Image: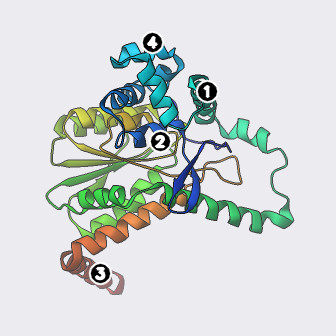
Amino acid sequence: MTDEGGNAERQDAPVSGEGTEIFASVAERVRRSLAGSSAGERLVARTLLANYPTAGLETAARLAERAGVSAPTVVRFVARLGFAGYRAFQQALRDEIEARRASPLTLAQQLGDGIAPDSLRVTAGAIFRQRLDESFAALSDSEIEAVVALLADQGRRVALIGGRYSHILAEYLDLHLRLLRPGTRVLDPRPESLAAFSVDVGRRDVVVVFDYRRYQRDVVEFARRAHEGGARVVLFTDPWLSPVSEVADLVIPVRVEAPSPFDSLVPALALVETVVAGVTARLGKAGEERLRRCEEIVGDVTLG
């Protein structure tokens, strides 16, 4: 089974973001292009995302045929993404594939001796601050607000799932949500439990998925089944986008590069806490009252 992990330093093309230069993967640039593209270019973008990344490794003519557009439309779309030509676009895709497949072992070899002990504090601090700045600059207020609105909707049930490492984020978000609203839970990752949830899933459900490279196959397949069952899918992922992005209603990518050969969850955790702050504000007095009652019960238990 494919699993999460790994980390790689790469230079994606720059994208502007409120005065801060940030870097976006090909996948993220294609996803973001949907809003301002022509009808033909949107067909190309959706074809790429639905068959990512293999469709982009085919010729421009073949991609055009898949999308039902002309080859010049594909070329214009690639140029609109900021590439000098189709060959440059494909090279960026190949680089991205390597980054997606990176493992802690291969990345440890790339890091070599790593950071010298006397500069660890300064260098690591700078790396984490940069990753946080890049992650927040790449997101829009509307994306965060849409996630908050879904999670604060008490008419919906919220189920959360993560991978080998990122299940920590699912549990952390759930621990906060359950204090603010009813109907939230972390899913049991055993196949029989996920199968039972998939049978019962419906339009009242919001499924929050945490999936980072190397993407976890069982999590991806579960998210697809939840989508087919009518659930709204919210994906927290990396800039190279988990395959769950093909079915997700909302995608929240963050940078994951770290000073070690292991992906960092620091930016992802910061986004989780941002969402918690938004849900708390949106629920207002209702969330405050539920929190008060929970605190009273916990106080009775600890003092008893």
What residue type is disc 2 on? Glu
Counting residues from the start of the chain, the first of labels 4 and 1 encountered is 4
Q: Residue at x 59, y 42 (%)?
A: 5
Q: CA distance from mark 4 to mark 3?
A: 60 Å
Q: CA distance from mark 4 to mark 1?
A: 18 Å
Q: Secondary structure at mark 4?
A: helix
What residue type is disc 1 on? Arg
Which mark, by number, is residue 94? 1
Badge 2 crowding class, 10 Å Cα cut-off, few under 14, some 14 to 19, many 20 or more, is: many
Q: Which residue is mark 4?
A: 62
| Of labels 2 and 4, the one closer to you | 4
Say whether residue 123 is left or right of residue 188.
right
Say whether residue 58 is left or right of residue 92.
left
Q: Which residue is mark 2?
A: 28
Q: Secondary structure at mark 3?
A: helix
In the depicted structure, whether residue 268 falls above or below residue 304: above
Counting residues from the start of the chain, the first of labels 2 and 4 encountered is 2
Q: CA distance from mark 2 to mark 1?
A: 15 Å
Counting residues from the start of the chain, the first of labels 2 and 1 encountered is 2
Q: Residue at x 29, y 74 (%)?
A: 281
Q: Secondary structure at mark 1?
A: helix
Badge 3 crowding class, 10 Å Cα cut-off, few under 14, some 14 to 19, many 20 or more, is: few
Which quadrant: the C terminus? bottom left
Q: CA distance from mark 3 to mark 2?
A: 41 Å
Q: Which residue is mark 3?
A: 295
Percent position (x, y) of residue 293? 22, 80
Badge 4 crowding class, 10 Å Cα cut-off, few under 14, some 14 to 19, many 20 or more, is: some
